[in-house]
Image (cartoon, rainbow, N blue to C red):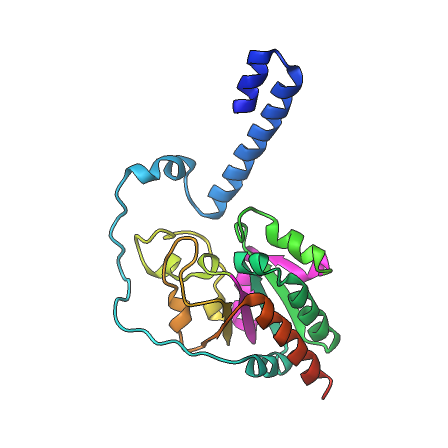
Amino acid sequence: WALVAEGFLLKSTVLTIVGSLIGFSGAILTKIMCDAMNRDIVNVLFGGLNNAPVAKGADTGPKEHTETSVPAVAELLANSREVLVVPGYGMAMARAQTSMGEIAALLREHKINLKFGIHPVAGRMPGQMNVLLAEAGVPHEWVLEMDEVNPDMENFDVVLVVGANDVVNSSAQEVEGCAIWGMPIIEVWKAKKVIFMKRSMGGGYADLDNPVFYKENTDMLLGDAKKTSDALASKVRERLEQV
C-alpha cells in the first residue's frame, strides 16, 4: 500500500496500479492463511496486545521419544501398502524435495500407494509445498489437501513427516489455550506408524512442543533433512531391488 501512496504523490498511474495489485494480493493471502489457521484477522493483527491465556491440558512431566534409523525406515516403507508424506518448511529449507520425489516414484513403481498430504499453510506461504513437489517431478494427482487425507488417516501404514511441526501438532486439539489451539491440522498420529524426519526435537514456528513426538506409534529420524532423505532414497532403492 506504500507503493499506492507513492503513486498518488508522484501522480504515476503505473505505480498506483502495481501497488494496488500487490496490496490486494497480500490481503487475499492473509485471508487464506487466517482461514487455514482458524484465526480471525483482527486477532492476528492485534492479538499481541492481549496476554496469552494459560494453556490447559499441557503435559509438563518427563517425556521420552523413540529414535529410529534410515535402514529401519526403508524396511518399513518397503513393507507398507499405504504411505503418506507430509512435507513442511524443513523440507523446503533443506531442498529435500527431489529425494522425496524419488522415494515416491520408487514406491509407486512397486505398487506401494504413496501420497503427499499438504497443509494449507505448510512452509511460509500457501502453495509452497505444491510448487516444490512439482519441481521434483511429483505428479499432481499424488498430492492431496489436508481435508482429503484426514478422513483416511487410520488406513495409512506409515506417515512420513518431513520437516513439518506445527501443522501436525496435536496440541491444537489437546492443549486448550496454546498458541495453535483450534487450528486445523493433519492428524498424523491416527496412522498406524509415524516417522518424523527433523533436525532436532525443537519446536516449530510456534515454538511449541509436539505431543505426537512422544506417542507410542511415533519414531524420530533425526538429522539434516537433505542428507537423511538422500540416504533414505538410496536404502529404499536397494531394498526394493531385492524384491
Magenta span contains residue 181 = no
Percent x, y for residue 139? 73, 60
How many labels sit on residues? Answer: 0
- Asked whether 234 or 33 is in front, the reply is 234
Report the side of 31 relative to 111 (left or right): left
- Which image quadrant for residue 239? bottom right
**Residue at left 56%, top 76%?**
157
Work out which quarter of the rendered image holds the C terminus and state it.
bottom right
Q: What residue sits 32% from the left and 73% below the top?
A: 63
Give the quadrant of residue 217: bottom left
The residue most toward the bottom is 242
Q: Position of residue 118 (x, y in %)?
A: 58, 57
Of 25 and 34, nearer the camera is 25
**Residue 243 shows in the view:** no
* Residue 41 appears anywhere in the view: yes
| Magenta residues (range) | 138-163
Instruction: Residue 152: say if magenta.
Output: yes
User: Which residue is rendered at x = 55% and y = 34% of the image?
Assistant: 26
Q: Is residue 217 above or below residue 125?
A: below
Residue 123 position within the rendered picture, expressed as x and y whole percent measured from the top left: 54, 52
Q: Residue 106: x, y in percent?
A: 71, 74
- Looking at the image, which is closer to me, 166 or 221? 221
Q: Is residue 25 above or below residue 37?
A: above
| 44 displayed left or right of 188 | left
User: Is 50 situated left or right of 91 in this image?
Assistant: left
Horizontally, residue 123 falls left or right of residue 41, namely right
Name the quadrant containing residue 94.
Answer: bottom right
Q: Is residue 25 above or below residue 203?
A: above
